[in-house]
Amino acid sequence: MEKQQRKRSTLSWVAEFAGQKRPNYILSVLLAMIKVVCGIMPYVYMADIVDKLLKMHAGALDKDMSLLTASIVKMAVFWLICRICHAISTTLSHAATFEVLANIRRQLTEKLSKLPLGSVLSQSSGTYKNIICERVDSIETTLAHIIPEVLSNAFVPVALIIYMMTINWKLTLISLVCVPVGAAFFMLMMVGGQESYNNCVTKTKRLNDTAVEYINGIEVIKAFGKSKTSYEKFVIAAKEGADCFIDWMRRCNLWQNISLLIMPYFLLGLLPFGAMFYMKGSISGSDLLMLIILSLGLVSPFMTIASYWDGIAKMETVIGEATEILEREELIRPDTMTEKPSGTDIVLRDVHFGYKDEEILHGISLNIRQGTVNALVGPSGSGKSTIAKLIASFWDVDSGSITFGGVDIRKIPLTEYNRNIAYT
């Protein structure tokens, strides 16, 4: 229960990771917002130009041409600023993210060195390789893209929609009907997505473990002529690793295509109802044209958010595997020797220990004297290996104590203790 209470949320981990380069991300988000605003402004000027052309008398064309030219120049300037801000924003976020990913990998490797060796050995080297390389690399999308892009593309369209509602709130709401309809199909695509993603993660882990096992054992495999059967195991793991992704994508294709067909096309409702409103005199031609052009400016932000939605949905699984290591309890040992052992006697006093919720050792007491040879004898599963691993300081006891030369091993620096204990 206590471990569950201490478990941190995914968002708190994202905030901590991003906090390592907070100024860069804040500046990246601000530039991304400026980019989105500048990307929409050409549509506003375009609507204004068309409005002026509609209201302009034939003889006034030469007179107002300078105003139209100025608007066109402003459109070009805003487009240029948009591209520059996008380039700087993505450069800042990526530069910060790559440093953060390097720091996360350092944190993971440093954490592994502080964990009980038994906890480390409970997972294969292929799993750790997958977590430290692939899983950490997956966080790049969250930090470098989702933070600046989603925040900026979610904020600015809200302001644009409010502006459109000041022109005609009824038509604005009608134009937005495509969003919930498209989102409904998008949610159908997401049904079972977490389970499918977890399945892909499991199959990928199995592939990594099999690959590492095959490579590490290639000498023995060839020596005993087992190349065919051993390679077949790797082929099966590789096929399963590919099939799980392909099956998932096939199941999502239909709903995703329907969603992308409907969600960003605000004109589906705006054009027919706008024409009806115009014929009834409820809206002027210039205002209707303004709404049509502004609605086109909403397409890009909505599409950007939709493209990262899948990454947001997978965020918890992606980040969870990396942070699970960072949340493990460390093997606490002092850096310096405060009490020197006298001899090499090993004594266990009322030792209790269990894996997770199952206790294996129930009050074990044992005295192993210096210079003697001792054997632990008992049926399989009785705790022989567990006692040996506790003596080797692979784990800490849950209660009781283990002393080496009269000193509790938890008070001896790990490097010093390892000089006196060998485990094979």
Image (cartoon, grey):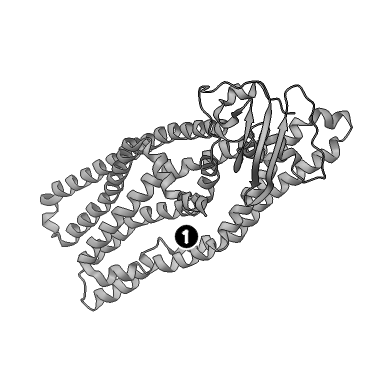
Residue 285 visible here: no
Q: At which x and y percent is residue 313?
A: 49, 54
**Residue at (38, 46) in percent of width and height:** 147
Residue 270, position as x, y percentages in the image: 33, 68
Q: Give left or right: position of 147 versus 292.
A: right
Q: In which quadrant of the rendered image does the C terminus lie?
A: top right
| 367 on left or right of 81 | right
Asked if one can make out residue 302 in the rendered structure from this viewpoint, the answer is yes
* Amino acid at dot 1: Leu
- Residue 287 horizontal side relative to residue 59, left or right: right
Residue at 25%, 76% (x, y): give it: 279
Measured as percent of width and height from the top left, residue 151 is found at 35, 50
Q: Secondary structure at mark 1?
A: helix
Residue located at (37% from left, 47% from top): 149
Q: Tag 1: Cα neighbours inside 10 Å, few (<14), some, or many (≥20)?
A: some
Is residue 399 depicted above or below 370 in this figure? below
Give the labeled residue for mark 1.
260
How many numbered marks have been drawn onto this rendered protein structure? Answer: 1
Viewer-nearest residue: 159 or 42: 159
